[in-house]
Amino acid sequence: MVDDALQVRFWGVRGSIPVCGPEFLRFGGNTACVEMRCGRHTLLFDAGSGLRSASKALRRAKLTELDLFFTHCHYDHILGFPYFALLYDENIRISVWSGHLAGRMTTVQMLEEFMRSPWFPARLDVCRANLISCDFTSGEVLHPRDGITIRTGSLNHPDGCIGYRVEWGGRVMALISDTEHEPGKLDPIVLDLIRDADLVIYDCTYTEEEMPRRYGFGHSTWQQGVKLCKAAGARGLALFHHDPTRTDAELEVLERNASGAFAGAFAARDGQTLEFARLS
């Protein structure tokens, strides 16, 4: 990884629950985990089952520090956390950020809930890494590392969820995972987060045809993602948080339809890597 590029790697792109089988090989079956490398700095977003695969690559990179951001703590976004190998390495400093539970639970309290009996056989204090708990409130602007600005906002999802806008080197990446849109409306918070973004990673769990049976579930569609990206002047759209029942063949159809409606659209895949040259 060179210091003058921003790299995005998808380690998990499914929602709700991991899946496996021959019908899920091309797009993958791991749940949400996205890596962003801003030059020499490594950011991870969510700790779904894809985090286990990410940890192997990160260990090979011999990192000494990284930042892990949670959008929220539903099972599909946390189940990989206890299996994140770097948690048990005393030579690594990990800053963990959350804001969706502000005023109700701190980040360290959230982590302790993940790792305690009877849900998991070991407590958080078994981790040997230097864990730094970082609390924030929705709407706050974060500066986790030199040159990195992260803007935050609340998404429409049960129990709360945070959307992120990462700015580095003249590039903008937005992660809008787990949000439900109102029919006929464009969420102003989402629009602000994705304005002029190079890439928008957006919750495309359902289609508009499926939404009448899915209202209240807290998810959106590729059609709404296209509308938002066009209105915000975004250049790329990654369909993300795929429904666990969606097969490779079905995702290829959705990808084809989305790219036909918006040239920068594609369906994210486990292991897929994108690189953006630094502009400033």
Image (cartoon, helix red, strand yellow):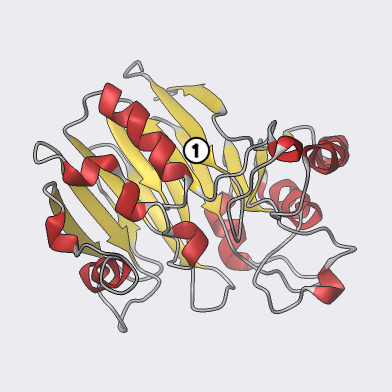
Tell me the amino acid under the disc marked 1.
Answer: Trp
Residue at position x 21%, y 51% in the image: 95
Describe residue 53's horizontal placement relative to residue 144 as left or right: right
Residue 36: image location, x then y, percent: 41, 36
From what the image shows, is residue 171 above or below residue 232?
A: above
Q: Quadrant of the C terminus?
A: top left
The residue most toward the top is 2
Residue 219 or residue 112, whichever sits in front? 112
| Residue 239 visible in the picture | yes
Residue 68 drawn at (x, y percent): 32, 49
Of residues 53 and 190, the one nearer the viewer is 53
Q: Residue at x 26, y 64 (%)?
A: 121
1 left or right, relative to 271: left
Q: Is residue 168 shown to the viewer in this render?
A: no
Q: Quick one: SS at disc 1?
A: strand
Q: Which residue is mark 1?
A: 11
Total labels: the figure holds 1
Provide residue 19's location: percent of width, then percent of height: 63, 49
- Determine whether, in the image, residue 93 is placed left or right of residue 55: left
Residue 50 x, y percent position in the rendering: 47, 43
Residue 77 left/right relative to 192: left
User: Which residue sits furthest bottom?
Assistant: 104
Q: Residue at x 34, y 58 (%)?
A: 141
- Packing grade of label 1 (10 A; few <14, some 14-19, many >=20) is many
Judging depth in this view, the residue of 279 and 110 nearest the camera is 110
